[in-house]
Image (cartoon, grey):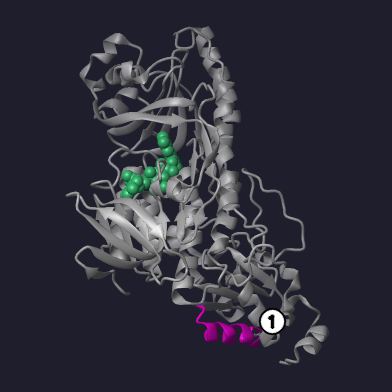
Amino acid sequence: MTTTRRLAEQELTTDVLVVGAGPVGLSAAIELGFRQVDTLVVTDQPTTAQHPKCNTTNSRSMEYFRRLGIHESLRQAGLPAHVQRASAYVTRFCGEEFARMPRPISNWPTPELPNHISQITLEQELCHHAHAFTGSNIRFGHRLMSFIDSGPSRQYPIEALISDPSGQTYTVHARFLIGADGANSLVRKAIGAQLHGEDGSLERSFMGGTMLSYYIRAPHLQERSARVPAHSNWIINPHLRGLMFAQDGQERWVVHYQVPPGVDWRELDPREVVSSLLTNDETLRKQPDLEFEILSGGPWRGGLALVADRYQKGNAFLVGDAAHLFTPLGGMGMNTGIGDVMNLCWKLDAVIKGWGGKHLIESFELERRPMGLRNAGFGVQCAAVMDGWQVPTNFEADTLEAHEARAMLGEQILKEDAAQYLTVGLQLGERYESSPIVMTENMPAPPDTWDELSPVLRSGARAPHVWLSPGVSCFDHFGTGFTLVNLGQPDAVHFLQEEARLKGIPLTIFSAQDLAPLATPEGTTSLFKDFYTSTLVLIRPDQHVAWHGEPHELSTPIQAKSLWSLVCGEFGVGFNSDALEMNTQPDKHEHSTGVNS
Ligand SMILES: Cc1cc2nc3c(=O)[nH]c(=O)nc-3n(C[C@H](O)[C@H](O)[C@H](O)COP(=O)(O)OP(=O)(O)OC[C@H]3O[C@@H](n4cnc5c(N)ncnc54)[C@H](O)[C@@H]3O)c2cc1C
């Protein structure tokens, strides 16, 4: 791997400058480092996050992290096993629990179920891996002040002005700039992108407008609640709505409180807010086992569903919260950002290494912006459901009537709130339909639903996961570049391999011969073939299917060349892949090209 080169005291050169070391910028650094792309990360914060926001790394993000070999360390750093992966619905943290929703997701078609991990711990872990993958090219306390992009004529067209912790400035020259600089992104403003969508001004019972968040330490709280520890605790009573996420399974939580309409959050007493979420019993509040310390806190805005109108200008790109801001119900903000970087980084690598086509990087916005729009709506829809939860005034009383009211609301919530968690389709079903770098499908697209996923072999979709042996997914056999699954004869892919070699495209073949030794009495091979229904399947570095078909479609050099041209981005927007040589009839094809295998 090359290292960032120092030109003069105040000038550095790198292939990719990543701005922001939140979870998305750090994931970009890891992915680029994994691909041996020279990368420099600058972030204006002195350390990784000290105040937690997100709590769930979803299945798809964990699949990406599995590919990078860091999934196990992230799981180990996650919440301990004794904390139930469940939502508890309570009147107060130490009040009555009236419903509990587990996560019946063990049958999801993925090698990686979601991981429950505090953003504080996640960022520490990601930072550790990013240091290892990039050769410690991560600079804390370094802020992007401005940048210019002088276009395609220069080898390093990005010229970025960075200030270091002492206020000294220096210049970074880069081929590409990734703006992972969060909600107030300077890069977004610099490329002239605007956010559009719901801005949180709609009044909601929960997760609308101003929210307060506190990170607390309360050593005896869990014991005092006398409840089985749950990952998330939803606090619902006639006076307030709140939420507490376990951070370490012992004594730390992040607490969220809905600031009532018309109330100025600055006039609220933070200790009073936190106490009110824990109990309504004045005597209990004063007891030592309810003692808590507020470690950090502040306001944030709920009810957002905002997506930038562009994700790219020239050599600068937006990812994560810089590109889209969601209300966090359903946990899609960071996870969509991780999807962004896993889509972008292999393309930058391809261009840097010389095998990426001239339109490849344009496909980033064409593929990922529709995903931002798709995923943005989910959080606000979950918030709208919560508006319908009516809480009678006697809800917290110790009476039969109140008990019945709690039971009824509990039943309603279990029915209505399940959608927030049972998002297998949302997490694993992203499809790059109508992308210029995947083959057009002739079959109509199956519905894209949040709560269901039928693994489908379809260009643009995530390749189906199949367990090949205990603990081994077919994904584990895919390469870091393209993978060609060949369930036919070895020579069926000769031309594709040869063309890849000539162009320097990294290609791994996963063949019927590789599959055979993995056959089990339960029928691994036939199970695999149930999902991989074409003889040949070309899978991109991000595990999405680029093309699938039959050997006759790749039986000449020109067909192989055409396919690589398409999937490596030689053709721009509006190109119809039906026009490719490989899609013409074999006899006509041979006649038209004069090339005969
Ligand atoms: C209450 C809550 C709960 C959430 N739960 C989930 C969840 O469970 N799952 C999920 O997927 N998402 C969740 N989210 C959303 C998630 O936290 C964000 O989507 C995620 O933090 C975005 O990561 P990022 O790296 O894009 O941006 P950030 O985390 O905001 O990081 C951007 C970094 O860039 C730095 N920066 C900014 N400007 C500059 C500059 N000019 N120069 C250098 N550095 C700069 C910033 O200081 C910051 O460190 C939640 C959000 C909230 C509010």
Vertical order, 500 against 6 (above or below): below
Q: Amino acid at mark 1?
A: Gln
Circle 1 SS class: helix
Seen at 60% across and 50% down, the residue is 370
- Is residue 290 highlighted in magenta? no
Report ligand 1 position as a quadrant.
top left
Q: Based on the displayed image, in which of its 4 quarters is residue 568 positioned?
A: bottom right
- Is residue 498 highlighted in magenta? yes
Residue 473, image x, y percentages: 52, 64
Say few, some or many: other residues with alpha carbon within 10 Å of mark 1 (under 14 / 14 to 19 / 20 or more): many
Q: In the image, 159: left or right of 164? A: right
Of 270 and 590, the residue lying toward us: 590
Residue 249, image x, y percentages: 32, 38
Of 165 and 32, the residue lying toward us: 165
Vertical order, 128 against 516 (above or below): above
Q: Quadrant of the N terminus?
A: bottom left
Vertical order, 323 against 578 (above or below): above
Residue 378, image x, y percentages: 57, 38
Seen at 54% across and 50% down, the residue is 310
Q: Which residue is mark 1?
A: 559
Q: In the image, 285: left or right of 114? A: left
Dominant SS type (magenta): helix
Q: Which residues are magenta?
A: 490-506
Report the label total.
Answer: 1
Q: Is residue 211 visible?
A: yes
Q: Based on the displayed image, in which of its 4 quarters is residue 570 positioned?
A: bottom right
Q: Is mark 1 within 8 Å of ligand 1?
A: no
Q: Quadrant of the C terminus?
A: bottom right
Seen at 48% across and 7% down, the residue is 399
Q: In the image, 407: left or right of 21? A: right
Vertical order, 40 against 56 (above or below): below
